Every structure is written in C-alpha cells, then in structure tokens.
Amino acid sequence: MKNILLALSLLIIGAPIALAQTTLSLDECMRIALENNLQIKNSGYQLDLAEVSLRQTRAQQLPDLSFNFGQNFNFGRSVDINTNQRIDEVFISNGYGLNLSVPIFSGFGLKYQGQQLKQAIQAGIKDVETSRNLIRRNIITFYLNALANQELYRVAQEQANATRQQIELAQKRVSAGVANEIVVYELKAQLANEEFNAVSARNNAELAKVNLFQQMNQPVDLAVQLDANLIQTLGSPAEALSSPALVQKAEASLPEIQGAQLRILSAQKGVEAARSNFFPSINFQGNYGAFFTSTRTEAYFSQLDATRNGSMSIGLSLPLFRGGAIQQQVQRAVINESMAENDLADVKNQLRSEVEQAVQNHRATQEQWRAAEQQVAAQSENVRLFEKRFAAGTANTSEYILSKNNLAQANGNVISAKYRHLIWKMMLGYYENGKF
C-alpha cells in the first residue's frame, strides 16, 4: 500500500491479448490488468493447493479400507502354513485380504486442523482481493495520469496556435508600417519555445500511455484512445469525511483488515489443534482374509472357504510422555496467535496512517484546484487585455509573452491539481465503500 501512496503523490511524470477496440475505459483497463496479472494467477494456484490440503485433512477422518492380494512361489526348506510342519518342496500359495481402519477419536485434532486450514484459505482469498484492489488503484493512477498528460499536450498546442495567430497579426502590422519587424522575430522565438514544449508534452502523453499498457501487461498501442468523459463523471471538488469516521468505515469493509482477522481465527484453531494432542486416541481395526496353498489337495475355492478368517480390535493410545513435544507445539501455536494479533494491529495502524494522509491530500488538492481555477480566470483576462494592447501597439512583446507564459503555467496547475484531487477522491471512496 505504501508504494501506491508514493505513486499517487507523483502523478504528473513523464501471452498478451490484442486490444481491438479504439477506446479503452477505466473499467476495461482494470479488467484487462486483473486478467493478465501473473501474481494474481499464482495466488489463485496457491489457494487451489490450500483447498487440496483441506480436503486431505478432512479425508483423514474417514475410514481406510484396503484390499490386498499376494502370489508366492516357494522352494527349499519352509513351513507349511496349514500344518506348521517343516517341508522341503516346491509349492505355490496366494492369499486375499480386506483391512479396515476407522479413527474413532483423536482429541478433535483433525477437526481443528481442518477449521484452521479453512480460515487460512478464507484469509488467502481476502489477500487476493487486497492484491486485486492494489492493481485497480495502480490502473486508476496511471489512467488518470495519461489523461492529465493528454490535457497538458492539448494546452501546449493551444499556446502554440495562439502565438501563430499573433505572428500573422504582427506580420500584417509590420507590412502596414505600424510595427517593428523585431516584434515578429520575438514572437517566432516564443513559438519555437512553445513548439518544443508541445513536443515534450506529446512525448509525456505517449510515455504515460506506455506506462498504462505496461501495467495491464499488454503490448503498447498508442492509437488506442482513453475515455476523457471519465472526468465529467467524477465531478468537481468535493468534501470528504473526517479521518476517524473514514477509518472506521475502512476497517469494516477492506479485505486487508478482514484477512488479518481471519488469520487470528486460523491461529486460534491451531492452538486448539496443538492442545488436542494431550488427549488419547481411539482407533478401530478390522481384517478379513483367506489363502490357498498347493501343498493341500483340496480345490482352490474350497481352500479359500476353509481358510476364511478375520479379526477386530479397538486400540487406545495415551500420550503419557513425549519429551515435552506437545507442550512445545502448543507454545508455538500460542506465539503464532500473538503474531497474528500483532499483524492485525499493524495493518490497522497502516490503514489509519493512509486514510489520514489521503484525507489531507484530498483537502490540499481540493484547495489547490480551486485556487488554480481562480488563477486561470485572472491570467486569461490578463492575456485578453494584453492581446488588445498588443494589437493596438501599446504593449511590448515581452509583456505579452510573459502573460501567455503565466497563463500556460496556470493551466498546468489546474490540470495537475484536478487530476491529483480526482485520484484522492476515488481513494477516499474506496476507503468509505470498500470498492472503486
């Protein structure tokens, strides 16, 4: 999370599938990024493995039934299994058997182990959702960054176009003999600077789009357009909840908190599973079988019928002394529970810090946006007046160029503050509702 907060503060910076559409919305970019993120896929595989372990643990509580068959070829001295007499001859024998083992009681250890794994899997699911939200936030940052750079490029082009118009007017005034030719050269020098700025702005816009495609793990396609109408749906500067209220809402809805809470429950079941080793275990055993040997003259199936035998038993195991191994298992489980509780407290502390920073940044960018809009309004009026004076020959070129540069700076401030504010606005919405 700390990495995304750093990325948010630096907004304005300079087997894949093909993207057929010419325009990509923010939601589509998030979907593509989630579908193609390899870490998310690996997390899914890890959850699948955990599910297998859970099924395996549950299966250990079921009876174990097996069938066995053996075929023997005997020669030399041996013991006749029918008479227990020593013999020295060649003979064959075989046997069949069924074996049954049923765990009757094991101190509920397997039950608690299954519950521990189940809670761990649920925590893993929350961790995956946390990772998915982090990807969504990254895409939001890079998407709005790309839109901001596109808008900066548009402003740079407008600045250059306005200067071109002034050059045409200045040339007409020079031809009419009412202006000095130096004015044209000064304006052309300004145009060269603005064209350079426009080229830089275009490169920044393309680089921002490259960064967005890389976040989606897709080949770059600069021809794809982004949905600029998104800005209208996000609205204007808005007030936010107070930090304590927002922290409370975030703790109730965010998956990182829920995942940490589930890990505590999992650790608690681990303690119960470890303590179950102090209890005795009871198992039922049963077997049934028959055999055949060529040392007897009876027919094959007659021998099998005559040698049928079986047994049943119930075994009790009492853990009297194991060198302190059980106590150590319990101690480790208790320590793991304490660590899980500490992790939850740490996650809550991080979340509180992030929410407080988000609220402050939201408030600051809100004020910057409004101040920048006032700055643009004032500088636009200033440029309009200078253009009238410049056309009348009562303002020099330096004054006019300075006013244009001030307006360009003000427009850049509006764009930067606006998009940074919108990012923080979406972040606060996430903290409040648990989704984007």
Image (cartoon, grey):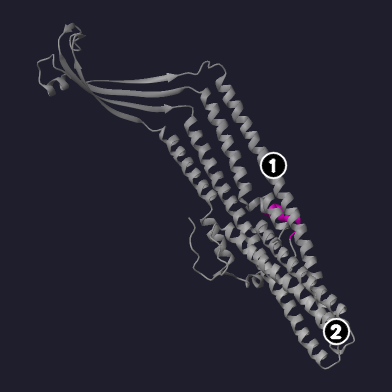
Q: Which residue is mark 2?
A: 385
The relative height of residue 208 versus residue 322 in the rendered view (above or below) is below
Q: Note whether residue 374 is visible.
A: no
- Chief secondary structure of the magenta portion: helix
Q: Is residue 245 magenta?
A: yes
Which label belongs to residue 264? Answer: none
| Mark 1 or 2, closer to the camera | 2
The relative height of residue 246 versus residue 375 in the rendered view (above or below) is above
The magenta segment: 241-249
Category of crowding for the residue at label 2, using alpha-carbon neighbours closer than 10 angstroms: few (below 14), some (14–19), many (at least 20)? some
Q: Which residue is mark 1?
A: 345
Q: Position of residue 16 (x, y in %)?
A: 49, 58
In the image, 182: left or right of 67? right
Q: Is residue 320 magenta?
A: no
The residue lying toward the viewer, choosing from 301 and 397, is: 397
Under mark 1, the amino acid is Ala
Alpha-carbon span between mark 1 and mark 2: 60 Å
The residue lying toward the viewer, choosing from 387 and 29, is: 387
Q: Earlier in the sequence, mark 1 or mark 2?
A: 1
Identify the element where label 2 is drawn: helix
Viewport quadrant of the C terminus: bottom right
Q: Quadrant of residue 285?
A: top left
Q: Position of residue 186 (x, y in %)?
A: 82, 79
Under mark 2, the amino acid is Leu
Residue beneath the point at 63% across and 70% down: 230
